[in-house]
Image (tube, helix red, strand yellow):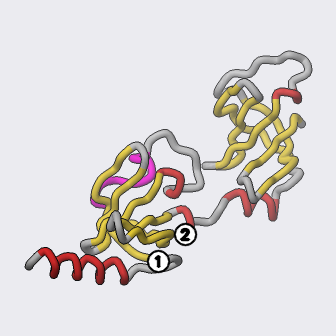
Amino acid sequence: MGTEEKAETTETLFHAFEQGQVRRGLVRSIERFGVFVDLDGAEGFVNVAELSWRRFEDTGEIVRIGQEVVGMVLHVDLEREQVSLSLKALQDDPLVEIARTRLGEVITGPVTKVVPFGVFVKVVDGLEGLVHISEFSDGRVLTEGEELTVRLSDINLLHHRLRLTLA
């Protein structure tokens, strides 16, 4: 096949993809910044932010090489010959479910991360909320793993944030 024929075939291949379409592919390689997926000869890429709603440290926690994945097409870049995909777009957002059914509820969960402006507490698997430092007027210092009882007080779906207050 000549260079011109190959370019024409590649162009035809990538024109078969459109935004919003759902496609299957096989994970070809895993990088810290995302995952490359073989879409029947076309290269797909899932940015790390589009892998899952849940927090994770390593992309290998979400997918493995050779795994079949299903993703939604976000963008087709004809110049780079790459299809941007989202696996997250096809998953239920746990924050929406919390907003619908549990706003105002009091829960006890482990502190998952301590930051200068507060602490993050696990609410459900894959979802954490922030307790702002202003809640700790007594000067208490928390450590990761410590259990904390909090109220699910405010949800911002647009910014995907869950604010917690001490209960």
Q: What residue type is labelled 1?
A: Val
Q: Is residue 63 above or below residue 113?
A: below
Task: Answer yes or no: is residue 49 visible.
Answer: yes
Mark 2, other Cα within 10 Å: few <14 / some 14–19 / many ≥20: few
Q: Nearer the viewer, mark 1 or mark 2?
A: 1
Q: Which of 49 and 17 is in front in this view?
A: 17
21 left or right of 135?
A: left
Quarter of the figure with residue 138: top right
119 left or right of 87?
A: right
**What numbered label is drawn on residue 155?**
none
Quarter of the image that includes the N terminus = bottom left
The extreme left residue here reads: 1
Q: CB under 8 Å between callouts 1 and 2?
A: yes
How far apart marks 1 and 2 lie (CA) works out to 9 Å
Quarter of the figure with residue 68: bottom left
The residue where tag 1 is placed is: 22
Q: Which amino acid does label 2 sit on?
A: Leu
The residue where tag 2 is placed is: 90
User: What type of secondary structure mainly makes up the magenta span?
Assistant: loop
- How far from the left and from the top, in percent, is residue 114? 68, 27
Q: Which of 66 and 9 is in front in this view?
A: 9
Quarter of the image that includes the C terminus = top right
- How far from the left and from the top, in percent, is residue 48? 48, 51
State the extent of the magenta-drawn residues as a range.
59-66
Q: Which residue: 86% across, 24% down?
A: 136
Mark 1, other Cα within 10 Å: few <14 / some 14–19 / many ≥20: some
Judged from the image, the secondary structure of the residue bearing numbered disc 1 is strand
Q: Which residue: 29% across, 71% down?
A: 42
